[in-house]
Amino acid sequence: MEELELVRPSHCERGELTAPFGIGIQAILGAIAFSTLLLKRWREPRELRRTWKIWFYDTSKQGVGAAFIHFANVFLADAVTAEDPCTWYLISFLLDSTVGLLLIYLGFKLTQKIVHHFKIRSLYFGEYGNPPKISAFLGQTILYLIVMVIEKVLVGVMVLPSFWHEVRKILLSWIKDPHIEVVLVMLIVPFCVNALMFWVVDNLLMKRSKAKNLVSLNSGSQEQLLKMSGYAKCNAQYFKLKPVDHKQTTALLLTDRQDS
């Protein structure tokens, strides 16, 4: 028994992240991340809140990208080093959530500039047509995944310098239980960081309204409203609301005000 205690590992080893305990922790993290996006939808203004189908399309894109990054980090943590893959995963995750987030933002801006230049509307992030088309969702998902692959390659190169080997030696050296190490690097730290990261990325992937005013119409023509409000030109988007006093209430979203 004493010999067994002496050889018992004090840090997580190769295969620890994909063991049943590690997989269970990852499942809990996924559920928490999903609930964060549900909370974000609930906090959206009621008249501008996305339908469940649009919300599913937006969040699924992010889910595919996040799953790719996560499993790439898990695979590389086991493949690159046999010594404490938890520290390798933690460093990669923190770089993905900081430098990687900046790369994702730049990739988002660049890809959208290109698709807007060539007027490929099906690849405008957050726009799926009316009615929403699955082909637009798949195209946008593939485009976003390409951005994530490029981000992961660049971040992976950043982890290669020998400097990180010294960081790994001291980063989690104070933890002597491999299970605690797994919980820390795959649940506690990701929970604190992903809540913010998922919120930011969802704002990038959803369609953003450029409305300057939101006017509720019960009666009167569109032209009269424009005249009263001082708008010479508008792009109108309608949101169906619950009937009030058995009358259909319509919301007209006005943009592109032209001052005389």
Image: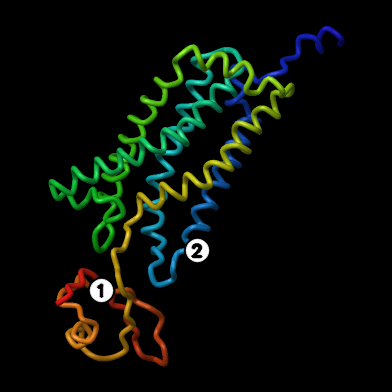
Which residue occupies the extreme right position in the image? Answer: 2
Which residue is the extreme one toward the top?
Answer: 3
Q: Position of residue 58 (x, y in %)?
A: 37, 52
Q: Is residue 19 above or below residue 30?
A: above
Side (left or right) of 54 relative to 184: left
| Picture quadrant where residue 228 is located | bottom left
* Residue situated in front as seen by the camera: 135 or 144: 144
Task: Give the residue displayed 29% in from the left and 52% down from the top.
Answer: 134
Q: Is residue 260 left or right of residue 70?
A: left
- Residue farthest to the front, as pictured: 260
Question: Can you tell which mark lies on residue 178?
Answer: none
Q: Nearer the viewer, mark 2 or mark 1?
A: 1
Task: Locate residue 242 relative to residue 32 in the image: left or right.
Answer: left
Q: Quadrant of the N terminus?
A: top right
Q: Position of residue 65 (x, y in %)?
A: 40, 38
What residue did someone put label 1 on? 254
Give the Cα distance between marks 2 and 1: 24 Å
> Which residue is located at x 41 percent, y 38 percent?
101
SS for callout 2:
helix
Are the residues at dot 2 and dot 1 in contact (C-beta closer than 8 Å)?
no
Q: Which quadrant of the structure image shows residue 248?
A: bottom left
| Closer to us: 236 or 169 | 169
**Quadrant of the rendering where the C terminus is positioned:** bottom left
Q: Which residue is mark 2?
A: 42
**Can you say whether 26 is above or below 156 in the image?**
below
Residue 81 position within the rendered picture, expressed as x and y whole percent measured from the top left? 53, 13
The answer to which image quadrant residue 50 occupies is bottom left
- Nearest the viewer among 215 and 47 is 215
* Residue pictured at 38% horizontal, 68% vertical: 48
Q: Amino acid at mark 1?
A: Leu
